[in-house]
Image: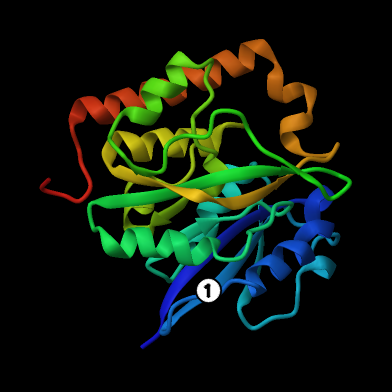
Amino acid sequence: MRRRIIIVTAVHAPSAHYLPDAHASLCRQELPEGWEWHWVVQEDGKGDEVAPHVPEDARVTFRQGRSGGPGVARTIALAHADGEYVKVLDADDQLPPGALARDLAALEADRSIGWATSRALDLLPDGSTAGFPGDPEPGPVERGAVLDFWKANGFRAQVHPATLFVRRDLLLSLGGWMALPASEDTGLLLALNATSRGWISPEVGLLYRKWPGQATGQAAHVDTAERDARMAVVEARARQLAHFNWRYPAGD
């Protein structure tokens, strides 16, 4: 019996033309014997512009739905996530070779670890890459460590939430991604860290594309009032989860 990693991607028309690059990066992944990946591409809306860019591959499922933002699209995609693990991959990003195998190995080796992240590099328009200053120490991440760092460093976590690899049962228990117009992935990262131990890989696990049309480059993303509200609810959720002391695995 084959075991499966579900790759979840939210996409809208402006980023759809990057899907073939994301698919190519998945095709370069090598997994242990008995494992396979399946890519669930969920359009944030119902238009005609995305489908032509979805690769023809039996391992790819394409769905459409009401527009609600990337968090809503990823969460509704979980209806088709029939694997033990879920890996997020934004439509405009790419996975370096070996990324899936490293994440899988970390969680298969230790049941107390609920999620994994990795280093990320910016993928610049000219094809070059650039790193981030102050990469975190690799290895286990204890509960609460991400929230503490995030709060002390201007609401910037030490790991990129777009690199998340997570146990499906844990992800569903937390309700998927937060219902926010942005920072929905940061909200999930902090909720995961409030309830379970994580893992940081020392290897680069994501090429994060920088381009003018990306959501994080828009003026609305840095609107002060909205950003303050997003950060407040993200923090409040994580702190309440920690207060209730619900832990993964259950019983620990």
148, above or below 164, in the image: above
213, above or below 251, in the image: above
Q: Nearer the viewer, residue 160 or 167?
A: 160
Question: Left or right: where does residue 30 sit relative to residue 65?
Answer: left
Q: Secondary structure at mark 1?
A: strand
Question: Can you identify the residue that label 1 sits on?
Answer: 37
Residue at the top extreme, as displayed: 225
Give the residue displayed 75% in from the left and 79% down from the top.
56
Give the residue displayed 54% in from the left and 48% down from the top.
163
Is any atom of residue 61 visible in this view?
no
Question: Left or right: where does residue 249 sit relative to residue 126?
Answer: left
Q: Quadrant of residue 32?
A: bottom left
176, above or below 4, in the image: above
Quadrant for the N terminus, please.
Answer: bottom left
Q: Nearer the viewer, residue 134 or 19?
A: 134
Badge 1 density bin: few <14, some 14–19, many ≥20, Cα 10 Å: many
Which residue type carries mark 1?
Answer: Trp
Q: Position of residue 94 (x, y in %)?
A: 68, 57
Q: Position of residue 118 (x, y in %)?
A: 50, 47
Residue at the bottom extreme, as displayed: 1
Residue at the right extreme, as displayed: 126
Q: Position of residue 202 (x, y in %)?
A: 48, 48
Q: Quadrant of residue 131?
A: top right
Please count the marks in the image. Answer: 1
Quadrant for the C terminus, please.
Answer: top left
